[in-house]
Every structure is written in structure tokens, then in C-alpha cells.
Amino acid sequence: MSESVAGLSVAGPPGRGEGRVGALRIGAVAAAFGRDLEGALARVATLIDHARRSRVGLLVLPDAALGGYLSDFGAEAEAELPPALDPDGPELRKVADLAGDMVVCIGLCEAGPGGIRYNTAACVDGSGVLGLHRKVHQPVGEERVYAAGDSFGAFDTPVGRLGMLVDYDKTFPESARALALDGAEIIACLSAWPTSITNRAPRMAQDRQSRLFDLYDRSRAAENQIVLVSSNQTGSMGRMRFLGQAKVVGPDGEVLARTWAKAGIAVAEVDVEASLGAARRRLSHLTERRPEAYR
């Protein structure tokens, strides 16, 4: 089901399933964010409000929602770079206050020591920061602006054990696998994923990066038998034209809700424990691994 709310499409089930124990409403956002922090926080407030009306318990916003992504893979001048933010600063505190009893994942440019910047995903609720992930894998050019993170770790939240990936991280199976082995039941993939720069297709659905984005989302969910929540930017910045295609994917690799290329919130209701249990009942990919054979 899809309905339009203030220019946003909220796609998903119309109400909470009666009698379903442990069901969690999950929202994946496709939306445009630029350099204007005040405007970004206003948009985040609107998205959280729409999600709350749909009784969402976990909302995943895009990479670089606070301050925007790079416009030309790091070739821009220093003055045009995303603002570097302190994870303990007022911007993320504002998002936490807006979240309240909702768990919200959001992307930002993190200010590290000595002027270092990280492309970071933060998970918050009203109590503050629940977890951080610094993007590990970098496409060519991003290293001009961001330092790379060096680890993947899951953490406990009020909606279950969660792990986060940023953008290009999900291209590498080891990233999601590391989180699943650390007990992640849900993986939030925050992206600012563009169409192909070098071979842009006339239609977004035919674009190589569009196909890969969808393939990675479904593969990472199915191979780890977890729930995957994929957010993405829309619109454009410099040469970047972002794909959208936010979605919630079940542990069998099936897409439960999606936005396609337009801005909106894909909402799916999932009993996470039950769905993971059903997926792993006969074939359990994590426990049936043979690490001694992987050379």
C-alpha cells in the first residue's frame, strides 16, 4: 500500500497486524539532503513525524543526511565539503531528541582528531547515541576527504541487535558477514549511492549501479539470513545523481517494501526473531560455515 504525505510516499502495510507478537515496523528512507544543516534537521523532523504516524520503531535515514555527500568524489574545494560534526554535538543530539522512543540511524561527516573526517553512520534514540560505524570501504576519490574506518561491530538497541554499513561497505560480503557473526539481527545500510558516472543509462532502471544496488541488498540479506534495511539519497549533487530505491529486505532475500527512485519511506512490519528463526530452521548459513576451508 502507498499513500502520499506532504510530498512523500509512505509505502508499506496500512496498520499493525493484530495479534502478531514481536512485530516491528521498520522504515527505510529515500530522500535528498544537501549542505544546509538547518534544512536537513527540519527534513529529518518531518520524516520522523511521518514514520511515527505509521508506528515505525526503527527508521533508517540515508548516508550523509546531515550535511550532504560529496559532489565530485572529493575533488571540490575545502569550503564546499560537508560540515564535520561532533557525534556528541548539538546536531546529533537534536536527532536523538526527535527520535524519542524510536531508534533512528542517520549518516554524517564525523569530525575526528587532528582534522580527520569520517563518513559515519550513527544510531540514536532519546537516550543518546547507541552505536557508530565509520565507513571502511571507499570508492576511488573518497580517500581525499575521508579517513577509512577499521572495524565492523554489532550493538544492542531497544529493537534488537543491530549492525550498520555505509554505502560501498555493502559491496563486500565480508562486511555484512562480520556483523551477522557478531549477532546482528538487523543490518542498516545507509547510502548516498549514485547512478553510473561513466556509463549513465537513459533510464534509471537500466543503470548498472541501480541493478547492483538492488542485488547487493538482497544478497547480503539472504546469505546472512538477516533483515536488511537499505536507505539512500535521491536528487543530485554535482555530478552525482542518486538512485533512491530504499527498501526493507527479509532474511530470504525478498523485498518486503520499497520506494523505487522517488523520495519516500518504505515501511514493512517484521517479526524479526520469528523470520530469522524460520529462515535458519533447515539451512543455517552462519553455523554451517567451514572457515578452515576458506583460504
Image (cartoon, grey):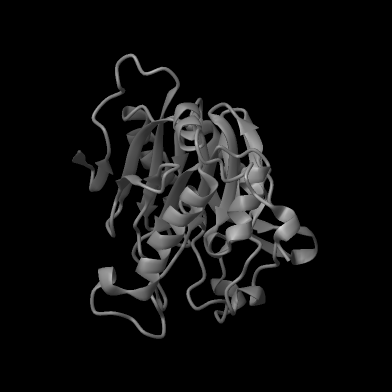
- At which x and y percent is residue 271? 43, 28
Query: Is residue 67 in sight in this rendering?
Result: yes
Give the quarter of the image for residue 89.
Answer: top right
Give the quarter of the image for residue 240.
Answer: bottom left
- In this picture, is 131 found above or below 140? above
Give the quarter of the image for residue 118.
Answer: bottom right
The single residue placed furthest to the right in the displayed view is: 114
Residue at 52 percent across and 61 percent down: it is: 167
Quarter of the rendering occupied by the C terminus: bottom right
The single residue placed furthest to the top in the displayed view is: 19
Q: Is residue 212 left or right of residue 200?
A: right
Query: Is residue 150 in sight in this rendering?
Result: no
- At which x and y percent is residue 218? 42, 54
- At which x and y percent is residue 174? 63, 58
- In this picture, is 28 found above or below 21? below
- Closest to the observer: 239 or 288? 288
Give the total number of marks visible in the rendering.
Answer: 0
- In this picture, is 21 found above or below 255? above
- Closest to the observer: 206 or 62? 206
Residue at 48 percent across and 58 percent down: it is: 191
Residue at 64 percent across and 38 percent down: it is: 183
Q: Is residue 193 left or right of residue 178?
A: left
Q: Is residue 118 left or right of residue 216?
A: right
Quarter of the rendering occupied by the N terminus: top left
